[in-house]
């Protein structure tokens, strides 16, 4: 944990009412996920119980308590994507990445596969996003090909 | 973003001519030249760079245009057309769309790829004759001509990152007019317009403002709800990305009407481009004196803050959203008071949706009478819908309230893709329901939709055909709401879970007699005893599909058959010996050896070994696997 980075975040929100969510968002931006020691540091500085941070972090789907993979693959599961067959795409990608049951990140930390309710690109459903690049009208075969492109990508997001 | 840099560079070129000149020469760029070539006085090329456009390769098309024009020494402003990242002007199905305005005449091309660019430049831009076979056809015009665009009019036309562009088309005139009136007059005008909240429930906006303006508390708030969480809806994002100032202007007018100085925009973190556009817009408005202290020297102060959501569907609910702005878990509270009495930080608060605010400047500027000219008696104005699913023309459409469902799906949407017929239209996302195909003459407004057990919701409209299983669709929505339930109250937290369990067992072939009645009873209880809108509307997708497609549920339960062929566990595969051409592809892909085949013989399927994976079905080129 870098205290200086934390202090920067703290300075930004010190006097603002209701900043727990904003602090967690910045924390995740800087460190990649929500780390326990960082939360404890903020909890002491702001005199807000760490349980408050924990409660908020677990309520919102945006926060991660575990480190994520180098490449983030997001499959849209919105209505339009569902109707156009997103489930088959997700199954194929899980199989291709060999992600263990109940996990969302590959054992080597190369890929994280997550679902999102809707990215608002319904006209080109089904949609898969890899590291913020959007792929439209995806089929299971196309999904496999897309993943292949990122197999060598270790630079990550 | 590369496009943005390009446009800016072009605009700034004369100012720092020396710098770019030397740099450009080094990089092999041409020396600046006026729109040249024979007969070219004025040329603009607009290329869509929405999410749809980019995925279809619009960046390559832009590069190719730049390249071709450079080689031929023609200067053009390759502007962004569909500046909104998704919605654009709606027609993402035909991306990449390229608009060429040559000497004042506009031609629109569709489905353009980089290899087509050279011919367009050669024949159209230089030769003056458009390439007819690539021009957007009847579908494009049918899609646009039947719409009534007042909110989306400027989206995709003006530069959303330039306040002057908005002012040029009459922006902030509504604010000027409002500030010359009393807050009471402004509220009365909005009331008279009959505008109803576009977030879903359709509460009259003017009334909401009136309640809040009557409060004598010194501190009040106005909030714009941009937490567009409904899967299948993206109009709020398109409006913010395409015309952010219209939302700001609406908020400032609203702030003036209810007498507050503080506004918040609560927006999903999933919309990074929209957030960026809003930040730019707020900065520009402040610089122009349209936001901040003493707006337009009227003595009225107003400021807007952006709060990012963190991914919780329930935060679209008013009281949960306010808890979230306060930095807490986004859980709804009991409605002991209206939020107009006690809302954010327990102060009187008005919360309206993005689309609602975008309507306000137009109403103030043109008058409530003008606005009432659109739509129906009880649902005035226009509404933006996100038309998606299995229709030909998918995208954002803006139509007057009360247009029939059929006109939207068949005429604007262009009918269904493929051979399958329309089965139902799902409106209102997870809070809405399915309207069967025989109700196509239903007028789409707040009250008509409620009368068939659906709702307007935020305006998502998903057309489904015969290959969609209604039980599976209901299960999809319930699993969504079950996942998003905040867990505060029992009917929603446990009720939706039980509904999901029942639906799951039906789709897996383990449904029991009486399950449908149980779902109906459970659904009714959840609706009547949940605390907030999420729980109260969660059973709608199930109840409406039971109402209109009960036979599909019963077919699953009694006959172990899924009519749409979606529910995997209920599928039965067999080889049609009449159409089997003895190629053997099915046997090769079968993972369990259930299919046996020998050359010159029909394939045979052993049902006891079949795991219903569907690989043979996908592999057969002759549709002989059923």
Image: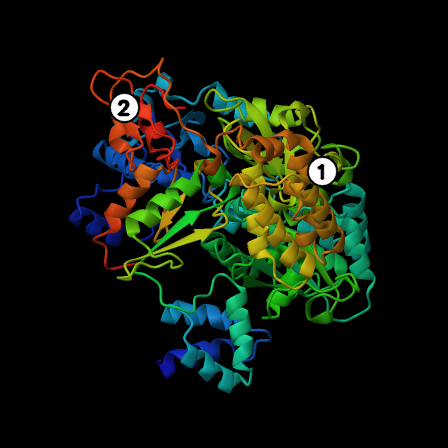
Task: Relative to B21, say whether B97 is above or below.
Answer: above
Image coordinates for residue B413, horizontal then vertical, percent? 54, 26
Determine which quarter of the picture holds residue A35.
bottom left
Measured along the vertical axis of the image, is residue B314 above or below residue A5?
Answer: above
User: In front: B74, or B403?
Assistant: B403
Q: Is residue A105 visible?
A: yes
Residue B208 image position (x, y, % from top left): 77, 54
Residue B354 in the image: x percent, y percent?
A: 62, 50
Question: Residue shown at 71%/29% (left/top)?
Answer: B443
Q: Residue furthest front?
A: B608
- Calculate the distance from the C-alpha at mark 1 to the C-alpha at mark 2: 53 Å
Residue drawn at the location 76% of the way across and 71% of the way down: B218
Contact? badges 1 and 2 (CB < 8 Å): no
Packing grade of label 2 (10 A; few <14, some 14-19, many >=20) is some
Quadrant where the C terminus of chain A is found in the figure: bottom left
Label 1 in the same subunit as label 2: yes
Q: Identify the element where label 2 is drawn.
A: helix
């Amino acid at each position: 944990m870098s205290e200086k980075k934390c202090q920067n975040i703290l300075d930004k929100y010190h006097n603002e009412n209701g900043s727990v969510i904003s602090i967690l968002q910045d924390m995740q931006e800087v460190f990649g996920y929500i780390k326990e020691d960082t939360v404890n540091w903020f909890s002491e500085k702001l005199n807000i119980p760490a349980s408050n941070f924990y409660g908020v972090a677990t309520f919102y789907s945006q926060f991660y308590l575990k480190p994520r993979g180098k490449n983030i693959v997001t499959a849209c599961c919105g209505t339009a994507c569902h109707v156009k067959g997103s489930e088959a795409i997700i199954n194929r990608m899980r199989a291709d990445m060999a992600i263990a049951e109940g996990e969302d990140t590959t054992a080597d930390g190369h890929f994280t596969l997550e679902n999102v309710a809707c990215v608002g690109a319904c006209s080109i459903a089904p949609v898969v996003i890899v590291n913020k690049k959007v792929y439209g009208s995806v089929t299971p075969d196309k999904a496999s090909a897309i993943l292949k492109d990122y197999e060598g990508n270790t630079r990550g997001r | 973003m590369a496009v943005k840099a390009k446009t800016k560079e072009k605009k700034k070129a004369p100012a720092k001519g020396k710098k770019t000149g030397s740099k450009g020469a080094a990089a092999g760029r041409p020396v600046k030249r006026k729109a040249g070539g024979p007969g070219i006085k004025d040329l603009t090329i607009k290329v869509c760079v929405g999410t749809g456009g980019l995925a279809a390769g619009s960046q390559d098309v832009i590069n190719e245009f730049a390249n071709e024009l450079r080689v031929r020494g023609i200067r053009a402003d390759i502007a962004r057309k569909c500046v909104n990242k998704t919605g654009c002007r709606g027609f993402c199905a035909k991306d990449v769309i390229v608009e060429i305005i040559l000497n004042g005449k506009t031609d629109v091309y569709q489905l353009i790829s980089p290899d087509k660019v050279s011919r367009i430049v050669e024949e159209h831009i230089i030769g003056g004759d458009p390439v007819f076979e690539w021009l957007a056809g009847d579908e494009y015009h049918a899609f646009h001509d039947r719409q009534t665009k007042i909110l989306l009019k400027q989206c995709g036309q003006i530069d959303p990152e330039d306040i002057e562009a908005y002012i040029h088309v009459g922006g902030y005139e509504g604010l000027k007019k409002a500030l010359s009136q009393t807050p009471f007059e402004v509220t009365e005008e909005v009331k008279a317009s009959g505008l109803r909240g576009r977030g879903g429930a359709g509460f009259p906006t003017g009334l909401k403002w009136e309640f809040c303006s009557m409060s004598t508390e010194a501190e009040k708030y106005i909030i714009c709800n941009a937490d567009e969480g409904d899967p299948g809806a993206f109009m709020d994002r398109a409006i913010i990305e395409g015309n952010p100032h219209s939302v700001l202007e609406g908020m400032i007018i609203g702030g003036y009407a209810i007498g507050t100085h503080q506004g918040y925009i609560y927006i999903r973190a999933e919309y990074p481009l929209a957030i960026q556009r809003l930040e730019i817009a707020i900065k520009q408005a402040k610089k122009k004196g349209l936001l901040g202290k003493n707006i337009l020297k009227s003595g009225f102060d107003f400021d807007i803050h952006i709060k990012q959501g963190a991914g919780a569907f329930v935060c679209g609910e008013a009281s949960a959203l306010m808890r979230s702005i306060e930095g807490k878990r986004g859980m709804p509270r009991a409605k002991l008071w209206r939020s107009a009495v006690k809302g954010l930080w327990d102060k009187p608060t008005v919360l309206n949706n993005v689309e609602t605010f975008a309507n306000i400047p137009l109403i103030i500027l043109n008058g409530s009478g003008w606005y009432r000219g659109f739509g129906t008696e009880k649902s005035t104005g226009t509404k933006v819908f996100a038309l998606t699913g299995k229709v030909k023309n998918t995208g954002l459409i803006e139509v007057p309230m009360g247009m029939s469902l059929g006109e939207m799906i068949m005429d604007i949407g262009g009918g269904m893709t493929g051979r399958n017929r329309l089965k139902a239209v799902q409106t209102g996302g997870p809070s809405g329901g399915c309207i069967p195909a025989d109700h196509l003459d239903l007028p789409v407004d707040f009250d008509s939709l409620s009368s068939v057990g659906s709702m307007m919701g935020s305006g998502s409209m998903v057309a489904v055909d015969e290959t969609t299983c209604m039980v599976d669709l209901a299960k999809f929505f319930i699993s969504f709401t079950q996942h998003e339930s905040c867990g505060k109250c029992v009917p929603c937290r446990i009720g939706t879970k039980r509904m999901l369990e029942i639906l799951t067992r039906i789709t897996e072939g383990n449904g029991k007699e009486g399950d449908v009645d149980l779902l109906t009873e459970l659904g009714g209880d959840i609706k009547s005893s949940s605390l907030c809108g999420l729980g109260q509307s969660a059973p709608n997708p199930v109840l409406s599909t039971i109402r209109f497609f009960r036979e599909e549920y019963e077919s699953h339960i009694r006959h172990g058959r899924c009519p749409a062929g979606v529910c995997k566990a209920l599928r039965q595969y067999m080889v049609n010996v009449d159409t089997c051409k003895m190629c053997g592809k099915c046997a090769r892909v079968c993972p369990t050896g259930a299919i046996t085949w020998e050359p010159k013989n029909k394939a045979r399927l052993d049902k006891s070994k079949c795991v219903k994976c569907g690989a043979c079905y996908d592999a057969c080129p002759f549709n002989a696997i059923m």
